[in-house]
Amino acid sequence: MVEFAGWHMPVQYRGVIEEHNCVRRDVGLFDVSHMGEIRVRGPKALESLEYMTTNDVARLKAGEAQYSLFPNPQGGIVDDLFVYCVKPGEDYLLCVNAANTGKDLAFVREWNKGAEVTDESAKWGQIAVQGPKALALLDRAISPEISKIPRNGFREFVFAGTLALVARTGYTGEDGAEVFVPAESAVALWRALLEEGRDLGVQPIGLGARDTLRTEMKYSLYGHEIDDTTNPYGAGLGWVVKPAQKDFLGKSAIVEGKERGLLRKLVGFRLLEKGIPRQGYSLFSFDNGEIGKVTSGTMSPSLSAPIGIAWIDAGFSGTGTEFAVDIRGRKARAVVVPTPFVTGTSLSPK
Amino acid sequence: MSYQLPEDYYYSKEHEWAQVDENIVTIGITEFAQEQLGEIVYVELPEEGAKVNQGESFGVVESVKAASDLYAPVSGTVIEVNLALGDDPSALNDDPMNDGWLIRIEMDSEKELANLVRVADYKKLIAEKK
């Protein structure tokens, strides 16, 4: 167990690689109850969220969710989040990173334009059910209607007499859902899913595999790929920034940053030699200029090869460009590759 | 869980073991260490002839989770390296006390052994960690 944002979290149950493979092959359960939940309600809810997030909130209908960002006035990122539309215009649930919940609440309150803001983090437990067999398990354990939820949609169900919000979302690159239940029901749901999914090969999955799974998809993790200084376009998150549709905090800084030309880009790379790239390692060109830094890296369990994500000078960001990673003083060759690193998952386009 | 901890070995606070045969010392990591590291996917070892210094890093083990330094329990010159680990480091998890040995060195001075601990003290050390 490790301390994470004030929560005791398991890094692994049986082993990172076994758990990783279980999610890619069958189905895994993640206790993500540490995630923060912020409720934004009232007649000013939409207006407030439109201003304090980068994605197009007005587009959301009831039961739809979207990935988004809290921008800062300088055009950086305060946090990344999911916005769940409970009732268009007036009731939204935001799911944010545990480590940032305090900062996010202060941010939401600072830029609030008259909505009712409540910290619901302690109220909700959350279990992510991910893998090619995740929907089969959820259909069995909660309701056969779950597999009919469209991607990024969510519906309310009743589990053991209480409300369960089931969202067809995730952070692994596999199909599945994230289930919000009242904190006091989380243990019962966890046990039910383990019991019902026994013949499907379900296993509990720790933080270690959560990280290798998201790294293989090049999903950003706050504090690694993105932070207060990141321009969303450079991070490849331009698809959740909607300057043509609306005004929002930091909009001019974000757009100007893009128009000036992005100096650095977030890329995926593979190491061509032995070793593992880790966060903070420097990247060098072959004439020894420093050209970037690794943000995440691991031995990819799916590829059995070392992979990494890095911020790199734009001139080196093209697929196939080779460079060197400084691994504790040894320069190991690496190459920019297309991402996601792993394709053919249950979420990949067919 | 009980660990394989031979009585005649020396142990370091960094969880390396040292088997001493006159001035030849075989070095590895303990079962407790491999358990803490998790699945080891890569190991970086010095070459034959390299000098290692007591308490200083002589290599690195990489688990899926993190990179961890390997510290030399005594100073000396590397005379043999477990090259099998380069292709497949799984012995470090499966059998760190035997097949997963790391390097063999010619020890500079047996006086340095006084800075290591024997089984009873090493057991206390890991009991405190748990």
Image (spheres, coloured by chain):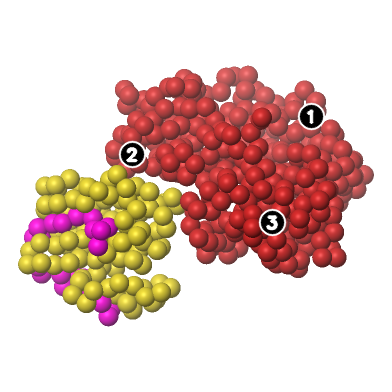
Query: Chain for mark 3?
Result: A
Q: Quadrant of the C terminus of chain A?
A: top right
Residue A71 x, y percent position in the rendering:
68, 37
Q: Are marks 1 and 3 in contact (CB under 8 Å)?
A: no
Q: Is residue A77 left or right of residue A53?
A: left
One can see residue A83 in this view: no
How far apart marks 3 and 2 lie (CA) works out to 36 Å
- Residue A177 vertical position relative to residue A163 in the rendered view, above or below: above
Q: Amino acid at mark 3?
A: Ile
Alpha carbon separation for disc pair 1 and 2 = 48 Å
- Identified at 14% across, 62% down, the residue is B25
How many numbered marks are there? 3
Kindly identify which numbered label has been placed on residue A127.
Answer: 3
Whole-percent x and y of residue A18?
50, 53
Q: Which residues are magenta?
A: B98-121
Residue labelled with disc 1:
A247
Residue occupying image coordinates x 66% and y 48%: A133
- The mark closer to the camera, 1 or 2, is 2
Residue B113 in magenta stretch: yes
- The residue positioned 62% from the left and 56% from the top of the image is A202
Write down the chain letter for disc 1: A
Of pointers 3 and 2, the one earlier in the residue sequence: 3
- As drawn, is B9 to the left or to the right of A279? left
Amino acid type, residue under disc 1 in the picture = Asp
Which residue position is annotated with label 2?
A274
* Secondary structure under the numbered disc 1 in the rendered image: loop
**Element under disc 2:** loop
Q: Is residue B114 left or right of residue A233?
A: left
Colour red, chain: A
Q: Is residue A147 visible?
A: yes
Q: Is residue B47 magenta?
A: no
In the rendered image, what is the letter of the chain coloured yellow? B
